[in-house]
Image (cartoon, rainbow, N blue to C red):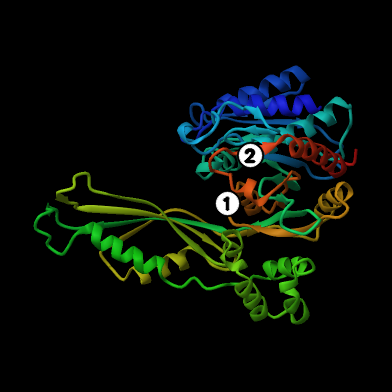
């Protein structure tokens, strides 16, 4: 399996499925060829040209509800001139496999497929239908992927469990032991466009009503506003578990007070780590600012787009009202682009216990914790249907490696890919009781 694992991932990374435009049909053809070689029936879905998803099923006894192994085919753009290797070369170099999607999330897609194939190749009959599902459009919100599938073909995706992206295995955060974080919840998404308008004019005669200047001033008020630390119950428990490893959290372990936790995180500087801060705050990121196309012309319009991520308990409409208040300019129009509330899955299920126990069997010294995913994933669509979803990634890497997600020279180590595939296969077999 080791040769298959690395070669298949390299082949998959060769396929450019940058979204936009997606072209996930290329990835579907990759999986379809393998399923045909293995004698596995599959079904494809295509809401628009080239935007395909693929599903394959190993029928079970029906003793339990189905399990869906979910992954997305599309990836974010990559600029070749910024990389040391070609982002769609699938190059294996110095013990790493490079390529856009190596971490997010083509590596996990290959793990899921190999676990799926292992059940088929061994002629095993699972206690539940085992569904492999590779989808389009996750990186752009899922409208042509999971959202479309669940809206148009709900009967095809009845399940009791979904395994998806969102988990992390970190080997350099704790002393002498790995940390596995399983995403049982994720933040809400609120993406908005702000538009400011004003009279155009010649740049040599400023008139005081410049649309761009007005927008920049308002954005400064939004971004400089206070986004206070909010300790949700899940995050309180998360840091209690980490407190067994980090001495600066010992006072919090003793009294369990939120104020003590905030003092500890602030005093240690941990609150300044972007990933830690994102678990504890509603965040606002200004990612697009557009206006004008000539230096000597005062623009008549300026636009900005904000990516806002919301903790459980904060709803998008309420935060949009807060943004409007901070803007303090009635002439700036707010247009919601994408809105979804935070979502979560129960942590007291037998399946979740099995996921943790398999990881502990492979890494007896590991610390396993339920975590909050600060990004968004397709899990939210299944959670809206009442289906438990867990983000699980049994690969171990450093925090610095995971920071390459959506970045330059994205890669995964050969060793962690091989080890992760074995853990994932064992986990799937255990969940299917085979």
Q: Secondary structure at mark 1?
A: loop
Q: Is residue 217 left or right of residue 367?
A: left
Nearer-N-terminus badge (1/2): 2
Quarter of the image for the N terminus: give it.
top right
Q: Is residue 400 above or below residue 30?
A: below
| Res 253 → quadrant | bottom right
Q: Quadrant of the C terminus?
A: top right
Q: Which residue position is annotated with label 1?
A: 376
Q: Is residue 169 above or below residue 425?
A: below
In this picture, residue 349 sits left or right of residue 81: right
Q: Is residue 205 above or below residue 38?
A: below
What residue is disc 2 on? 105
Work out whether residue 296 can be spotted. Answer: yes
119 sits to left or right of 132: right
Image point (73%, 59%), residue name: 370
User: Gap between marks 1 and 2, in whole Å?
Assistant: 13 Å
């Amino acid at each position: 399996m080791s040769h298959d694992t690395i070669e298949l991932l390299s082949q998959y990374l060769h396929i450019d499925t940058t979204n936009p435009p997606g072209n996930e049909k290329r990835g579907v053809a990759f999986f379809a060829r393998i399923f045909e070689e293995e004698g596995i029936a599959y079904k494809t879905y295509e809401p628009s040209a080239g935007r395909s998803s693929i599903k394959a099923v190993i029928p079970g006894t029906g003793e339990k509800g189905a399990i869906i192994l979910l992954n997305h085919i599309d990836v974010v753009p990559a600029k070749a001139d910024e990389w040391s290797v070609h982002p769609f070369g699938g190059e294996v170099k110095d013990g790493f496999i490079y390529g856009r999607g190596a971490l997010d999330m083509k590596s996990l897609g290959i793990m899921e497929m190999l676990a799926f194939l292992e059940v088929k190749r061994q002629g095993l009959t699972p206690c539940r239908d085992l569904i492999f599902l590779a989808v389009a459009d996750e990186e752009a919100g899922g409208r042509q992927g999971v959202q479309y599938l669940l809206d148009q073909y709900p009967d095809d995706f009845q399940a009791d469990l979904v395994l998806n992206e969102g988990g992390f295995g970190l080997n350099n955060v704790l002393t002498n032991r790995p940390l596995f974080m399983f995403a049982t919840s994720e933040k809400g998404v609120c993406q908005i466009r702000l538009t400011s308008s004003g009279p155009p004019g010649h740049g040599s005669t400023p008139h005081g009503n410049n649309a761009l200047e007005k927008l920049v001033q308002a954005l400064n008020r939004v971004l400089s506003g206070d986004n206070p630390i909010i300790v949700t119950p899940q995050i309180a428990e998360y840091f209690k578990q980490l407190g067994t490893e980090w001495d600066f959290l010992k006072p919090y372990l003793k009294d369990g007070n939120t104020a003590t936790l905030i003092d500890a995180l602030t005093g240690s500087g941990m609150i300044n780590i972007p990933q830690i801060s994102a678990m504890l705050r509603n965040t606002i990121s200004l990612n697009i600012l557009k206006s004008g196309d000539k230096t000597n012309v005062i623009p008549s319009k300026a636009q900005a787009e904000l990516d806002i991520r919301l903790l459980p308990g904060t709803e998008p409409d309420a935060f949009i009202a807060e943004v409007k208040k901070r803007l303090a300019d009635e002439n700036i129009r707010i247009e919601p682009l994408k809105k979804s509330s935070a979502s979560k899955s129960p942590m007291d299920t037998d399946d979740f216990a099995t996921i943790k126990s398999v990881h502990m069997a492979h890494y007896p010294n590991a610390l396993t914790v339920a975590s909050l995913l600060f990004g968004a994933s397709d899990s939210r669509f299944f959670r809206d249907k009442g289906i438990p979803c867990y983000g699980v990634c049994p690969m171990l890497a450093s925090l610095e490696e995971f920071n390459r997600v959506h970045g330059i020279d994205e890669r995964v180590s050969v060793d962690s890919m091989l080890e992760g595939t074995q853990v994932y296969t064992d986990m799937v077999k255990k969940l299917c009781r085979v």
